[in-house]
Image (spheres, rainbow, N blue to C red):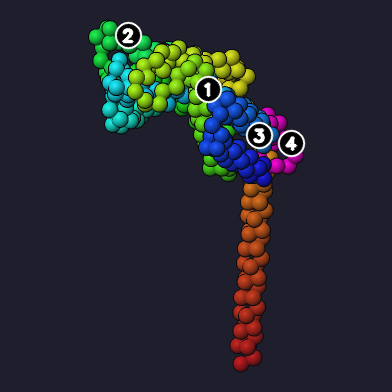
Amino acid sequence: WDFTKLAVLMTVLSLGLAASGILIDDINFNFGLSISCGIITIAGFYIYTPPMIAKVNAYTLIQTLFSCSIEGASFYFFTDGPEQYPEGPHFSDWFYTTAIGLVAAGTAILGIVLFNLYLGNQNYQTIFTWSTLVYSLLSLVNVVVYKRWNVAWGVSDKAFVLGSSALTTVISEFNYMPAVMIMSRLCPKGMEATMFALLASASNLGGNISSYSGAFVLDYFGVRPDGSANESEQFKNLWLVSLITSILPCLPLVLLPYLIPNAKPTDPLPGIDDDNNDDDKAKQYGVRRGQNDTDRLLSDNGEEKDMEGAYDGNFRSGEETRFIGSFTNTGNRNNGHDEEEEDI
């Protein structure tokens, strides 16, 4: 029931946040509500899931919260025509959505392959630290485009954007893969699909919150493009917003030693992969809060072995009984037959 309660809680939060975005046209209110939803989600995971799962989810959700999305303003910056933004790149909608999307999809696969080849045996904390720092560094490249320095250097906007998009996508996969690997190790036995659904919901909710936080930052610095004519002034501070949002994801790194296990993907996790008894495992796993679902799952192995042993013993006893009875009946029938022959 713990996971069911958590699912209901997240459903209510997601619906409330969506309704607020549709019905209330107040950026500050929606931003405050989204942050509140994020805090409640983290608290819900601490209440209804084992602490180790709650910690990893808290870190990934907090990092998502600090990864403010400014795609709304970026779309107008890259796709506005000469009438709207004479100094802009003037990308077509197809190039900005489809071409860049295809490059990102292809490099995402490349990122997974490179991670498995070179980073699969590195420490979790090391992977998170370096991938976050490199991602933030590459994100700073967008400042060059927003300031139009690449044009002064003779580098085309399309080549610059495609290259930066490919590199940032590869590094983002380096940051995404260790989180997936940890969660795959922490999921309670028999509840893998349920737990991954809850984690995916939390990740999606974090993505929505990052959109609200990005809108708040854009509005604070006066970046409010809408595709109207002569809106060059709206992009004056876009480079500053990009600079701030590139640095913000580095702030959650201070929580890394407290929320992410100091282990490699191949190392046993405390309370999960060791051979301790069920009480020690439950204590280390952080689930000793009464007889809940995870507690019962942790004791499944011992119960199944006892049941198998009892069943095997009963089966053998039954077989021996039936064999002895069959042998006795056969002997009785043979004795009766012999007596009849003597009488004859």
Query: Which residue is denoted by mark 3 in the rendering?
Result: 44
* Badge 2 element: helix
Residue 256 location (% of width, % of height): 58, 18
* Three-letter code, disc 1: Phe
Query: Which residue is denoted by mark 4 in the rendering?
Result: 289
Q: Nearer the viewer, residue 192 or 148?
A: 148
Q: Is residue 289 magenta?
A: yes
Asked if one can make out residue 50 in the rendered structure from this viewpoint, the answer is no
Q: How many marks?
A: 4
Q: Where are the magenta residues, as a range?
A: 278-294
Circle 4 residues within 10 Å: few <14, some 14–19, many ≥20: few
Residue 102 location (% of width, % of height): 31, 30
Q: Quadrant of residue 148?
A: top left
**In this picture, is 335 found above or below 188?**
below
* Three-letter code, disc 4: Arg
Sequence-wise, the earlier of marks 1 and 2 is: 2
Q: Residue at x 55, y 37 (%)?
A: 23
Sequence-wise, the earlier of marks 4 and 2 is: 2
* Three-letter code, disc 2: Trp
Question: Is 340 positioned to the left or the right of 279 in the image?
Answer: left
- Label 1 and label 2: CA atoms lie apart by 27 Å
Circle 3 residues within 10 Å: few <14, some 14–19, many ≥20: some
Residue 236 location (% of width, % of height): 41, 13
Q: Is residue 226 magenta?
A: no
Q: Residue at x 63, y 19 (%)?
A: 258
Q: Residue furthest top?
A: 153
Of marks 1 and 4, the one in the foreground: 1
- Label 3 and label 1: CA atoms lie apart by 25 Å
* Badge 1 element: helix
Of marks 2 and 3, the one in the foreground: 2
Query: Which residue is denoted by mark 2 in the rendering?
Result: 149
